[in-house]
Image (tube, helix red, strand yellow):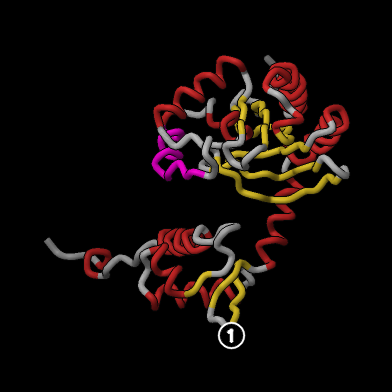
């Protein structure tokens, strides 16, 4: 049987596959940074990603060209670039939750006099996109990662996720922040079950000492929980005896956001 040209000429790898691999590598580099790790050396990024030094250096050079990272030459470290902030601002401006939630966040603050947080789930953490501080009233649009296992917004979301997602959060590690942080998977599973039963989550100084927070889930049009709303204050301002009453207010406002997003029971 004679060979055809297609048999003789080796197939070129699909360009789309190569592009996807490159994007995945860029994503892994970006994931190395956090609020507690703002500046990283080349060696640290290599260690975190497992990429060879030459590959990491090439990726960082390309990312620096488009503004995704900035290099501090004196210290030979890298930081996330302003271009990401610009893109993030566009995402937030177009995020329906951000638009529909703003007025309700302010209303909840005026009603309770407490700090209010609006967060969305990224698959591992609760990402705060809006917050209003208690004193003075200051409503801001921002992005801040919060652990899902020990914050009221995080637990309010996590309680309604599929088992494999909860397992992934647990596998990432239940870091201890305070003496009351839940670090045992079995204890967290029980806490999430209790959250589903009562319809809201409570953070009793689990993320920040002395701070008590109450969070309620927010559903999208399909009824899936993807975000949460919370109020927080020093524990002495929110005694345990008042949590149930406060939770009703938080749940009501969270439901208002869900309704504005198209969710109907």
Q: In the displayed structure, does residue 226 sit left or right of residue 229? A: left
Residue 35: in sight, yes or no? yes
Let me know if residue 57 is in the magenta part.
no
Q: Residue at x 69, y 67 (%)?
A: 82
Q: Is residue 264 above or below residue 80?
A: above
Residue at left offset 49%, top offset 43%: 176
Q: Quadrant of residue 64?
A: bottom right
Q: Which residues are magenta?
A: 164-176
Q: Main secondary structure of the magenta part?
A: helix
Q: Nearer the viewer, residue 177 or 13?
A: 177
Q: Is residue 218 visible?
A: no
Q: Which residue occupies the foreground of this view, 68 or 106?
A: 106
Image x and y of residue 29, in percent? 49, 64
| Residue, disc 1 | 74
Residue 62 shown left or right of residue 218 in the figure: left
Q: Based on the displayed image, in which of its 4 quarters is residue 43 positioned?
A: bottom left
- Count how many numbered circles sit on residues in the image: 1
Q: Nearer the viewer, residue 180 or 134?
A: 180
Task: Give the x, y percent position of residue 221.
Answer: 67, 26
Outermost residue, left side = 1
Q: Is residue 243 above or below residue 6?
A: above
Which residue is pictured at 40% across the width and 32% down the height?
185
* SS for callout 1: loop
Residue 172 part of the magenta-drawn span: yes
Q: Quadrant of residue 102?
A: top right
Image spot of residue 194 (x, y percent): 53, 19
* Residue for point 42% across, 45% down: 172
Determine whether 242 is above or below 29 in the image. above
């Amino acid at each position: 049987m004679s060979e055809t040209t297609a048999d003789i000429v080796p197939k070129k790898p699909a360009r789309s596959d190569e592009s996807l691999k490159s994007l995945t590598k860029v994503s892994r580099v970006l994931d190395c940074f956090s609020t507690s790790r703002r500046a990283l050396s080349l060696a640290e990024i290599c260690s975190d990603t497992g990429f060879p030094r030459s590959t990491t250096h090439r990726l960082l050079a390309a990312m620096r060209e488009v503004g995704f990272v900035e290099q501090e030459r004196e210290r030979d470290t890298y930081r996330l670039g302003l271009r990401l902030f610009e893109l993030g601002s566009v995402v937030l401006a177009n995020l329906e939750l951000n638009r529909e939630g703003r007025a309700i966040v302010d209303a909840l603050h005026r009603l309770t006099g407490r700090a209010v947080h609006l967060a969305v789930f990224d698959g591992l953490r609760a990402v705060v996109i809006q917050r209003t501080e208690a004193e003075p009233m200051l409503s801001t649009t921002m992005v801040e990662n919060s652990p899902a296992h020990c914050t009221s917004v995080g637990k309010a979301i996590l309680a309604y996720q599929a088992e494999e997602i909860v397992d992934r959060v647990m596998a990432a590690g239940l870091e201890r922040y305070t003496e009351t942080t839940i670090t045992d998977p079995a204890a967290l599973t029980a806490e999430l079950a209790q959250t589903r039963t009562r319809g809201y989550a409570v953070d009793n100084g689990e993320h920040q000492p002395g701070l008590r927070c109450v969070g309620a889930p927010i559903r999208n049009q399909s009824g899936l929980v993807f975000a949460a709303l919370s109020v927080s204050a020093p524990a002495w301002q929110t005694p345990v005896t008042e949590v149930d009453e406060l939770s009703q207010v938080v749940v009501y406002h969270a439901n208002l956001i869900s309704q504005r997003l198209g969710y109907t029971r």
